[in-house]
Image (cartoon, rainbow, N blue to C red):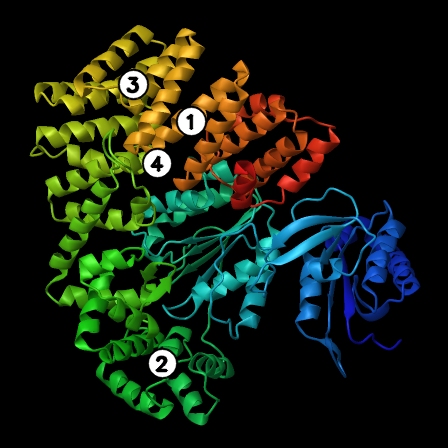
């Protein structure tokens, strides 16, 4: 073998796409095809000075002293392969590797291999380091991408022409990237990945709390992301306690607006469903979705098996002895010792227990930790039927808790009241938490912090829950929790037609609102339950109609409920029925609500019910009745608010007066903005932009669509985001800017592939496509290709620029 290049070296990695499928189809002819492929690639590489470093199966690893020659060699090789049966992906990266007796070592080697793995057959992908050294070759900027095992995004380019799908990187996923290093478990991850790739569609990672199921699942799913065209998604269920909410939670995570199985359909998708044990009753529902979706695969973490068809159990074992020591030393920043080995063994090498022990290594030696832990084990010995691992884990958590000062002990227990974590304001109001105490609990690994959110691992939270329950003040803490979130919902102004809406106060704490609601219901306090349901009217009614109906109906059955609360709840029930398709039931509810408020002479509440009825009759073409309801609503409210103006605009449009409708929508957007009605403003802007385009009011449509898109991102409305992008693509097309129209259309296509909720969009797609898509237009298609590489945040930036 020729001497390996030194100094600045460009690595070229290759791999055959679909080799297993090719082997199956070609049979005995495969060996000859593979041999010819090797000959063509070797000739191309050697002609440009490449040195073959390694060959494994159908893959090459070649080194070049010159980056331009390496890029040219890749192009020569692809041309030599031509339109033959073999499609080869290639990746290039330039760096300054270290050479040992075994060959090249270092991160540059791994980066080159990851880049090659991201490409498709026939495609050559290069890093920015290689691109910077080559002047006379056409490159396509593919943007920044996350590569497995690399913390920072990597800028990638395509060498040469050709249209390919989005790169097989880990961008199409919400799989978290833990800040701490992943130690050990290589064998477990490899086995789980092998099970999924081998055809297992439901792999359950079982084991006690603290055994590392979640982290192993995350690493396994990360390894599998590129195998699934529609992406891989993490669905944490630790805050979900009702089995009936499991499919809805999964749907919200992947953007499904209705029927989860119908939304996934034929998509090739991986779901990592985490902490399933407390909602095990939902296992049959999950099984039904799996059965209906032939290309869906599941990795589930649970202390209890799901026991449904097709389940493959993978018990997550403790860390191997050396891995436990390595984990402790990495977290405590200490060198290995016999005492550390003894400590890890006494903790049964459970990752969480080791992490908790390591958190105290800055004040206690391993020998001192062993002494205290031994005392705790004797004191807290569990029952005979308790899992031995759970005993030691409980001892480790109890021991860590015992080391806290009194004020931190009280705070630790009180924090258990939160579902899905909390921000500092909530912790301070409900638990009287100070910043120093919260930070101390984080540093001691009893509380975790992500951004501005504080949360507990579920196993640790179990101890905190027991502590607050035995403290005698659980009801007091839960009452403060309820009061805080009721006030927060009212501050968000989710109910009513006037007043600023601060929706950010709702989005991050949905599970806490559910917990507060459950507290009110469990205490048989119908007034508390009704007040919170009313405060969350728009969330229940518009965003979660099925859950809203589920929450409201039992309250309405209580005969002690006063008329005022009943009237509001009946109206909310009507909204949930309308959103779920029961339009006749919705009308009856709105009429009942109106009757109650008229009897109570509550003008504002009656005005809201009339506006809902106006919307209903407009939908069915009863325009005279709808207009009468709008006029009466305005008379009672004393003004035409944003919602009423939008309702009147719909009536005028249905009546054929499009000009009047557009004027009213402009007024609705202005009034909604002035009164802080974010959702109303967004709807008015989007509707105006869509109706104005066919009338040639392009500049006005452009302005409205931009404002509507900005608001849609602010309120996390995925459907309105797609509409905004589509409208701006339409505007660009109307102005003759084919490249921009193609870029925004391509971004929509890429966004839809992530599984986002597109309810309502498909019925308009044909109309939009007819106005936007210019098939065969080179400028449009170039923009379309570029747009497909944009993530949604970047696409919105481009659209608004």
CA gap between label 3 and label 4 equals 20 Å
Viewer can see residue 256: yes
Instruction: Pick whichever of labels 4 and 1 is earlier in the sequence.
Output: 4
**Rendered image: mark on residue 109:** none
Helix or strand or loop: what does disc 3 sit on? Answer: helix
Q: Which mark is residue 584?
A: 3
Q: Is residue 236 left or right of residue 785?
A: left
**Within 10 Å of the Cα at label 4, are there few (<14), some (14-19), or many (20+) other Cα atoms?**
some
Residue ID for mark 2:
357
Identify the residue at image location x=44%, y=32%. Answer: 708
Residue at image mark 1: 685
Location of residue 387 with respect to 377 vertically, above or below:
above
The label shown at residue 543 is: 4
Residue for point 73% across, 73% down: 96
Badge 1 crowding class, 10 Å Cα cut-off, few under 14, some 14 to 19, many 20 or more, is many
The C terminus lies in quadrant:
top right
């Amino acid at each position: 073998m020729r001497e390996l290049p030194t100094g600045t070296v460009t690595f070229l990695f290759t791999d055959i796409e679909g080799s297993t499928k090719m082997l199956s189809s070609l049979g005995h002819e495969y060996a000859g095809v593979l041999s010819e492929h090797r000959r063509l690639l070797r000739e191309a590489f050697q002609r440009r000075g490449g040195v073959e470093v390694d060959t494994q199966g159908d893959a090459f690893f070649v080194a070049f002293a010159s980056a331009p020659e390496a890029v040219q060699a890749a192009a020569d090789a692809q041309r030599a392969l031509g339109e033959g049966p073999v499609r080869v992906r290639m990746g290039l990266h330039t760096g300054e590797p270290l050479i040992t007796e075994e060959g090249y070592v270092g991160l540059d080697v791994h980066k080159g291999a990851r880049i090659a793995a991201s490409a498709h057959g026939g495609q050559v992908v290069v890093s920015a380091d290689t691109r910077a050294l080559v002047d006379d070759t056409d490159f396509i900027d593919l943007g920044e991408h996350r590569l497995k095992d690399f913390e920072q995004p990597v800028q990638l380019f395509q060498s040469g022409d050709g249209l390919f799908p989005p790169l097989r990187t880990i961008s199409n996923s919400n799989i978290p990237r833990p800040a701490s290093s992943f130690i050990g478990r290589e064998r477990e991850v490899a086995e789980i990945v092998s099970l999924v790739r081998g055809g297992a569609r439901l792999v359950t990672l079982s084991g006690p709390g603290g055994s590392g199921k979640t982290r192993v699942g995350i690493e396994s799913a990360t390894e599998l992301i590129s195998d699934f065209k529609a992406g891989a998604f993490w669905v944490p269920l630790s805050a979900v306690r009702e089995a009936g909410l499991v499919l809805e939670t999964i749907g919200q995570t992947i953007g499904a607006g209705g029927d989860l199985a119908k939304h996934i359909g034929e998509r090739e998708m991986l779901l990592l469903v985490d902490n399933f044990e407390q909602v095990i009753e939902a296992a049959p529902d999950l099984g039904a979705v799996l059965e209906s979706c032939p290309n869906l695969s599941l990795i589930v973490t649970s202390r209890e098996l799901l026991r449904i068809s097709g389940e493959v159990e993978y018990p997550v074992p403790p860390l191997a002895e050396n891995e436990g020591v390595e984990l402790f030393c990495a977290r405590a920043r200490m060198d290995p010792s016999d005492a550390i080995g003894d400590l890890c063994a006494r903790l049964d090498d459970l990752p969480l227990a080791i992490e908790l022990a390591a958190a105290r290594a800055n004040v206690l030696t391993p020998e001192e930790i062993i002494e205290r832990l031994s005392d705790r084990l004797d004191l807290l010995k569990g029952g005979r039927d308790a899992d031995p691992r759970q005993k030691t884990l409980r001892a480790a958590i109890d021991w860590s808790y015992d080391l806290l000062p009194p004020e931190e002990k009280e705070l630790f227990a009180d924090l258990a009241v939160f579902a899905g974590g909390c921000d500092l304001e909530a912790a301070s109001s409900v638990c009287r938490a100070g910043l120093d105490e919260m930070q101390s609990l984080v540093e001691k690994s009893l509380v975790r912090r992500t951004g501005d959110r504080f949360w507990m691992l579920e196993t640790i939270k179990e101890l905190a829950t027991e502590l607050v329950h035995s403290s005698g003040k659980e009801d007091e803490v839960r009452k403060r929790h309820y009061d805080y979130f009721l006030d927060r919902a009212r501050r968000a102004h989710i109910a009513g037609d006037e007043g600023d809406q601060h929706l950010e106060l709702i989005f991050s704490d949905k599970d806490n609102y559910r917990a507060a609601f459950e507290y009110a219901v469990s205490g048989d306090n119908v007034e508390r339950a009704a007040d919170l349901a009313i405060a969350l009217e728009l969330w229940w009614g518009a965003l979660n109609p099925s859950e809203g109906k589920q929450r409201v109906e039992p309250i309405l059955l209580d005969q002690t409920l006063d008329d005022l609360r009943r009237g509001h709840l009946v109206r909310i029930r009507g909204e949930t029925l309308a959103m779920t398709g029961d339009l006749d039931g919705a009308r009856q509810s709105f009429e009942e609500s109106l009757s109650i408020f008229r009897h109570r002479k509550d003008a504002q509440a009656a005005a809201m019910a009339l506006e809902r009825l106006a919307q209903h009759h407009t939908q069915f073409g009863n325009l005279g009745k709808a207009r009468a309801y709008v006029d009466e609503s305005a008379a009672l409210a004393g003004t035409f608010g944003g919602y009423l103006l939008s309702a009147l605009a719909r009536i005028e449009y249905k009546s054929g007066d499009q000009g009047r409708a557009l004027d009213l929508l402009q007024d609705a957007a202005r009034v909604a903005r002035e009164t802080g009605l974010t959702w109303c403003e967004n709807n008015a802007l989007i509707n105006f932009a869509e109706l104005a385009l066919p009338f040639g009011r392009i500049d006005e449509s452009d302005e409205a669509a931009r404002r509507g898109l900005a608001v849609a991102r602010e309120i996390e409305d995925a459907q309105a985001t797609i509409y905004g992008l589509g409208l701006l693509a339409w505007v660009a097309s109307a102005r003759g800017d084919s490249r921009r129209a193609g870029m925004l259309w391509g971004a929509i296509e890429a966004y839809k592939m992530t599984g986002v909720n597109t309810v309502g969009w498909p019925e308009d797609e044909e109309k939009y496509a007819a106005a936007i898509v210019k098939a065969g237009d080179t400028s449009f298609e170039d923009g379309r290709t570029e747009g497909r590489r944009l993530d949604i945040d970047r696409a919105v930036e481009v659209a608004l620029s």
